[in-house]
Amino acid sequence: MGRKAGAVVTRLVLVLGDQLSRDVAALRRADKARDTIVMAEVAEETEYVRHHPKKIALIFAAMRKFAMQLEADGWTVAYSRLDDPDNAGSIVGEILRRADETGASEALATEPGEWRLIDKLKYAPIKTHLYPDDRFIASHAEFEDWAAGRKALRMEFFYREMRRKTGLLMNGDQPEGDKWNYDHDNRKPAEKDLFAEGPLAFEPDEVTKEVLDLVEARFGKNFGDLRPFTFATTRDEALQALGHFIRHSLPRFGDYQDAMLAGDAFLYHAVLSPYINIGLLGPLEVCQAAADAFAKGDVPINAAEGFIRQIIGWREYMRGIYFLQGPDYTRLNTLKHDRSLPAFYWGEKTQMACVADAVAQTRSNAYAHHIQRLMVTGNFALLAGIDPHQVHEWYLEVYADAFEWVEAPNVIGMSQFADGGIIASKPYVSSGAYINRMSDYCKGCHYTVSRKTGEGACPFNLLYWHFLDRHRDRFSGNARMGNMYRTWDRMDPDHRETVLVDAQAFLDRLDAGETV
Ligand code: FAD
Ligand code: DLZ
Ligand code: SF4
């Protein structure tokens, strides 16, 4: 690549694999006539954890097609493929290589979604202007202002601010239907004959097929099935996926948001997080589509509100917490859990039908829905006292939508309570009864969900009480957990002793690597 004609020296404009939006901050500041866009598939980004092959394929295919569109629009793009022999192997290395080629002495970049990469760019040996990533509804400063001086950072209050700011589902100052939150209506358990359309699936084109071959050769041994690969990889396709969701699944999204069915990986969930997170869709346009469907009378309020809350509420709030807490957040371990992640998280056999199903779907699809992540794999890890950093790395690896700014607060905070309650006011733990109520897993399980002790007792039942008992000092004073401790304390002391002995025996078998 040569220096561009004319006296003005080119600048480099970095676009990362999760910044594939035409209006991303650095691109908005770029000059077509003068600048060179840098996009790079690099070893460092593919290896900081062993990502699911589908996740790498999604990102590479979407990056290649985004670069082609930019070129078609007249931009100069320096695109590095992973197998380019001159590939420097890291984002900063690639910027420096392109600087050498073009004579550029500065780079523009949009703030990455991970402290690791922010630091690398900040300290890169080339002048790099980092612009805030304003594809979000709340800026860092707005979140900091909201958080300042509050004793507890509860999502619900932040969410109301975001409703006011966006005007979504608002009548003037008042929430649509005079209620901010319809979660109470969104707890219907799964019914066997539920029919859900599922997400739109896309046939790989030639570009995607080439990426799949590369990913198979380089990352075929990572956990996860690469094929069939059906993700959308362009904005046009992602918009089709959005339209399909609004039409077919959103109407029942609210009702069955917490339901789980063996063999139905998606139910009425959107499966849009991979597209929103890499920039193919904007969070506001997705919410606006849901609000429009409500306005037209196509979807009920509990569906539209529930869906919009996940995005302008939870998603924004998680990002706010990640950036507020700083780079050490992923190392928090308030409960001092230190057990190794069991091999069944990597697909080894387990007799727990719920865990086996969630892991199998994760392996096939690089996807599991929220309740599987929170109340099956997350719940088990928390009850069993698994090291939260290992849990964090697992989630970062196995899901196509996993980027640290959103994954870490969900795992370290919401799921593992490793942040001591910054995000969750109490730990998300449950016995087998909750899983049984919300799913059809227990019927097909080796364990018996109604059994509290002894042969065949559901491990979630044993570990639930073991967890509460071993963390009594921390949680017994928590107003939201008083009932649980009162129930435990009312049990016959011999029964309590048996529960704890059986739970410990289960943990010992887990530690010994036995199939549990
Ligand atoms: P739907 O259930 O259809 O929800 C709609 C949208 O709301 C999602 O696309 C997503 O953009 C947003 N959303 C919903 N819940 C959350 C949430 N808690 N945090 C942020 N956004 C949310 N989400 C990620 O995007 N990346 C992750 O790495 C991730 N890791 C998680 C780990 C754990 C332990 C838990 C409990 C949750 C995690 N989530 C993560 C949140 C949530 O599970 C996913 O966003 C959701 O399952 C994505 O699937 P969907 O598009 O079908 O979502
Ligand atoms: C996740 C990922 C992967 C697997 N590969 C690349 C890549 O080769 N090039 C790139 O620009 N981005 C990649 N990404 C996304 C980055 O890891 C992501 O931008 C940071 O984690 C910040 O969110
Ligand atoms: Fe899971 Fe227990 Fe039900 Fe088995 S019985 S599926 S382990 S909750």
Image: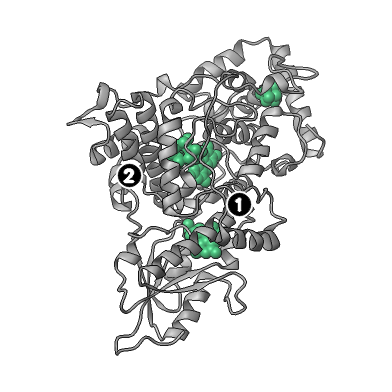
| Crowding near the residue tagged with mark 1, few <14, some 14–19, many ≥20 C-alpha atoms within 10 Å | many
Label 1: which residue? 54
Viewed as shown, does residue 241 lie left or right of 298?
Answer: right
Residue 394 vs 499, above or below: the answer is: below
1 or 2: tag closer to the N-terminus? 1
Q: Is mark 1 within 8 Å of ligand 2?
A: no
Give, as a three-letter code, the residue at label 1. Lys
Q: Residue furthest left?
A: 172
User: Could you say where residue 48 lies in the image, as x and y percent from the top left?
Assistant: 60, 60
User: Is the residue under label 2 in contact with that under label 1 (CB below 8 Å)?
Assistant: no
The x, y position of residue 488, in whole percent, is 61, 16
Check residue 72 in the rendering and tell me which mark sits there, or answer none.
none
Residue 319, x across and y down, in percent: 41, 47
Neighbour class for label 2 at 10 Å: few (<14), some, many (≥20)?
some
Near-viewer residue (59 or 141)? 59
User: Mark 2: which amino acid?
Assistant: Leu
> Quadrant of the rendered structure where residue 299 is?
top left
How far from the left and from the top, in percent, is residue 334?
Answer: 55, 41
Mark carried by residue 284:
2
Q: Disc 1 and disc 2: Cα gap in Å? A: 26 Å
Residue 93 in view = yes
Q: Does 235 sit above or below residue 146?
A: below
